[in-house]
Image (cartoon, rainbow, N blue to C red):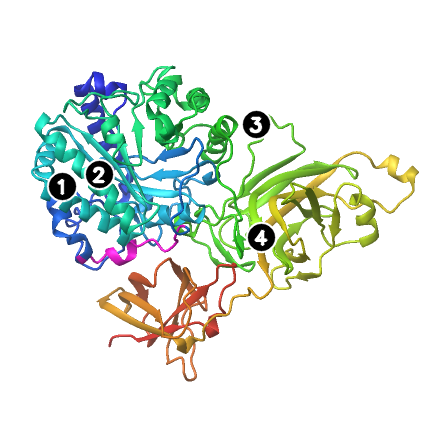
């Protein structure tokens, strides 16, 4: 991507680019290993911790070498978009990643150990996500595709040619009609195999005029093959080289770049546009105005409005012109360590985007729906209120549906502060929503959770959510509905308590008030209460879910009430939320319905008689079983005898949590096996789309005898 500095001072930009790359490599380095020997060169054929990585040369692309890589099967995205999902006919938001050069914490396919890793969670403000780096072929790490698809967002990789080396590559790419078609076929094959939705094409090199016909053929043929192989896919052209062969960023759609625009699904316009350029571009695009994505560099390098904390200035102009926006490098918030902390600064920055642009995605749309508000990083992992790991971690593939929490502003004027808590005990995953503040007996506070688009049928719909609270702090769910005739209704799923007092308190403000049909208190994990409520709103669409913070109406005289009107402390935690219809409970196939095997078993000697094991575990359902599962927890038991007979565990933790898999394989690297261990039992805990998990004793497993 070329901001003002690159287009006007290329030598200075090149120096800064090299410096940035160098500093990024320093930031990623482990200080503790500075005196150690450098690691051997990366060999994708050798079994190792699964990584995402780009392709650096046309030879790699042409040879299809990537498909022989050990890492390829791990890089397949498991979450699919709805078939042939088309972009909406309205101004759209494209977000281009470009975070610290790409392939940082997210390169670790099975997750890493950085609790503060970069993430995006405002997916409800995004239509298209582009994973970008300055490598020839940038393949999106599957974690980004998985979480973006979960939220209804398309994901594109990047094909870029720049600088002197890019010119040499362009000459090879554009050598003939056959060559451009061959490379287009290779790019299409990669996108389909890895499960992402298309490409951003960036040709930032000068070309000979005679090469332009083959460039047009490349764009046209790539678009055609992507559309036929993956309906709903996208090919976006970046505003760079012109039809004259000149590398001359137009900063608008005009006759110099429209011939490329006409052959694909849209254009990403460079950032240095002027105020009237979006409107002029819309006029050139005619009925394809929404396919024009006006660029904004969040770092503010030569961009209209200055980017950074005034990114909304450019967004307002783009929205007024009725075209789309391309936001480049929102990782600016993270990279520049904006105060006071990443969570607060990120929510504030995206709050500006929402204020200018509005919400573009709605969910839930289908059932079952489940969210534990997990952002894909944290300091622990819980399951059903019980801690299964105390290690810091990051893995965006595990990010669940993200709540539409509104940024409350820089002041503390709201009586209740709403935030994601990563440090306190969770119910599921690594985070929960906390509601902390003061509230008097007659007051209530609402917090937006989700904007839905869920049509309801004749059968009842069940809401199950986990809550932890102090004193008389109560937490319910306020639901909004609309009908085909646009009739609005509201329903309160109240917290457990006195039914008569609750009805008296809320019946005038809701169409109906529903008390829980079942309340379960967890004995082993004190504090968590599971509340289950059911409604039947056939013919309506669920449009909104809010958290309602309130206190029970006091059972006392008016005189007593006057004496206690002062606000008191309020504290509640929402652990997770599940919405399901009748008959949608997950039925897990029994353990013996899975084939589980191992590959690449490697033993090495450790200290004090211990051993280290590296192994790839693979599992697959046998024929006849519907495969509806996308995520798996992996555990290990270290035993001194086979699991079929009398046994004892050698570790204090009965089931040691190893990680989460988003594909049906998991690689374990250098697992320490204590002296005296005879067998290892690897357990694959299957997880349902509704948030439920198979019991460990019923889950498929692999038993491995310790060598020697």
Q: Residues within 10 Å of mark 1 (few under 14, many from 20)?
A: many
Query: What's the magenta region?
Result: 68-81
- Sequence-earlier tag: 2 or 4: 2
Which circle, 4 or 3, is nearer the viewer?
Answer: 4
Alpha-carbon neighbours of circle 3 within 10 Å: few (<14), some, or many (≥20)? few
**Was residue 70 drawn as part of the magenta stretch in this picture?**
yes
Query: Mark 1 or mark 3: which comes first in sequence?
Result: 1
**Drawn side of residue 696 relative to residue 195, left or right:** right
Residue under label 3: 409
Circles 1 and 3 in contact, beta carbons < 8 Å = no
Residue 629 relative to residue 168: left or right:
right
Return the residue nearer the eye: 547 or 461.
Answer: 461
Position of 637 relative to 273 (above/below) = below
Which part of the image, by quadrant, shows the C terminus?
bottom left
Q: CA distance from mark 2 to mark 1?
A: 10 Å
* Earlier sequence position, callout 4 versus callout 3: 3
Residue 694 image offset from top left, x and y in percent: 49, 68
- Residue picked out by circle 4: 577
Using the rendered image of the protein, determine whether residue 453 is visible from the camera's viewpoint. Answer: yes
Secondary structure type for disc 3: loop
Using the image, tell me which numbered label, if any, was put on residue 180: 1
Residue named by callout 2: 220
Residue at point 34%, 53% (across, down): 77
**Name of the residue lying farthest toward the bottom:** 645
- Which element is circle 4 on? strand
What's the distance in space between the residues labelled 3 and 2, CA to CA? 46 Å
Where is residue 433? Give x, y as percent: 57, 45
Res 491 label = none
Circle nearer the viewer, 1 or 3: 1
- Residue 395 visible in the current orientation: no
- Using the numbered discs, state the Cα–Cα distance from disc 4 to disc 3 in whole angstroms: 26 Å
- Between residues 707 and 582, which one lies in front from this camera angle? 582
């Amino acid at each position: 991507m070329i901001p003002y500095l690159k287009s006007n001072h290329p030598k200075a930009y090149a120096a800064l680019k090299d410096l940035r790359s160098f500093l990024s490599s320093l930031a990623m380095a482990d200080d503790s290993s500075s005196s150690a020997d450098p690691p051997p060169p990366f060999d994708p054929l050798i079994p190792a911790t699964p990584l995402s990585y780009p392709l650096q040369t046309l030879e790699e692309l042409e040879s299809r070498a990537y498909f022989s890589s050990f890492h390829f099967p791990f890089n397949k995205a498991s979450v699919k978009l709805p078939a042939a999902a088309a972009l909406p006919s309205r101004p759209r938001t494209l977000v281009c990643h470009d975070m610290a050069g790409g392939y940082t914490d997210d390169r670790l396919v099975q997750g890493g150990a950085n609790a503060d890793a970069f993430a995006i969670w405002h997916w409800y403000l995004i239509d298209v996500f582009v994973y970008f780096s300055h490598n020839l072929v940038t393949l999106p790490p599957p974690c980004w595709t998985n979480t973006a698809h979960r939220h209804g967002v398309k994901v594109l990789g990047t094909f870029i040619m720049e600088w002197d080396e890019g010119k040499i590559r362009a000459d090879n790419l554009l050598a003939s009609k056959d060559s451009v078609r061959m490379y287009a076929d290779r790019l299409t094959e990669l996108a389909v195999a890895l499960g992402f939705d298309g490409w951003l094409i960036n040709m930032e090199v000068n070309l000979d005029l005679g090469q332009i016909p083959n460039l047009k053929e490349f764009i046209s043929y790539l678009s055609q093959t992507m559309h036929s192989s993956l309906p709903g896919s996208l090919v976006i052209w970046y505003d760079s080289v012109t039809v004259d062969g000149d590398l001359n960023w137009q900063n608008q759609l005009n006759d110099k770049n429209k011939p490329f625009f006409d052959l694909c699904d849209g254009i990403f316009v460079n950032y240095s546009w002027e105020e009237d350029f979006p409107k002029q571009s819309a006029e050139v695009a005619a009925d394809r105005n929404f396919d024009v994505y006006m660029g904004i560099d969040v770092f503010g390098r030569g961009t209209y409005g200055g980017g950074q904390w005034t990114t909304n200035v450019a967004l307002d102009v783009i929205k007024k012109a009725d075209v789309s926006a391309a936001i480049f490098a929102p990782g600016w918030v993270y990279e520049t360590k904006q105060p006071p902390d990443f969570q607060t600064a990120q929510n504030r920055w995206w709050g500006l985007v929402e204020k200018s642009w509005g919400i573009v995605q709605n969910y839930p749309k289908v059932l079952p729906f489940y969210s534990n508000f997990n952002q894909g990083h944290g300091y622990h992992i819980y399951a059903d209120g019980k801690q299964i790991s105390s290690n810091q971690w990051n893995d965006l593939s595990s990010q669940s549906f993200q709540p539409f929490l509104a940024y409350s502003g820089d002041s503390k004027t709201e009586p209740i502060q709403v935030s994601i808590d990563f440090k306190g005990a969770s119910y599921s995953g690594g985070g929960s929503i906390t509601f902390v503040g003061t509230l008097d007996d007659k007051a209530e506070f609402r917090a937006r959770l989700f904007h839905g688009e869920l049509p309801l049928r004749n059968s009842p719909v069940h809401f199950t959510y986990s809550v932890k609270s102090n004193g008389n702090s109560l937490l319910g769910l306020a639901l909004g509905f609309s009908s085909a005739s646009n009739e609005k209704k509201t329903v309160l799923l109240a917290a457990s308590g006195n039914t008569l007092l609750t009805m008296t308190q809320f019946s005038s403000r809701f169409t109906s008030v529903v008390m829980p049909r079942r309340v379960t208190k967890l004995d082993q994990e004190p504090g968590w209460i599971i509340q289950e409520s059911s409604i039947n709103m056939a013919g309506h669409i669920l449009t909104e879910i809010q958290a309602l913070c309130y206190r029970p109406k006091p059972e006392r005289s008016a005189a007593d009430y006057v004496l206690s009107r002062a606000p008191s402390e309020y504290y509640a935690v929402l652990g997770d939320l599940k919405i399901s219809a009748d008959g949608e409970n997950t039925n897990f196939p029994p353990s013996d319905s899975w084939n589980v095997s191992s590959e690449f078993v490697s033993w090495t000697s450790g200290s004090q008689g211990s051993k280290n094991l590296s192994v790839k575990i693979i599992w697959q359902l046998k024929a006849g079983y519907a495969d509806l599962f996308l995520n798996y927890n992996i555990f290990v038991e270290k035993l001194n005898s086979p699991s079929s007979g009398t046994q004892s565990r050698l570790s204090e933790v009965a089931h040691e949590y190893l990680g989460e898999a988003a594909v049906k394989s998991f690689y374990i690297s250098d697992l320490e096996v204590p002296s005296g261990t005879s067998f290892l039992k690897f357990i694959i805990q299957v997880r349902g789309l509704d948030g439920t998990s198979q019991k460990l004793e019923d889950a498929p497993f692999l038993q491995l005898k310790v060598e020697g």
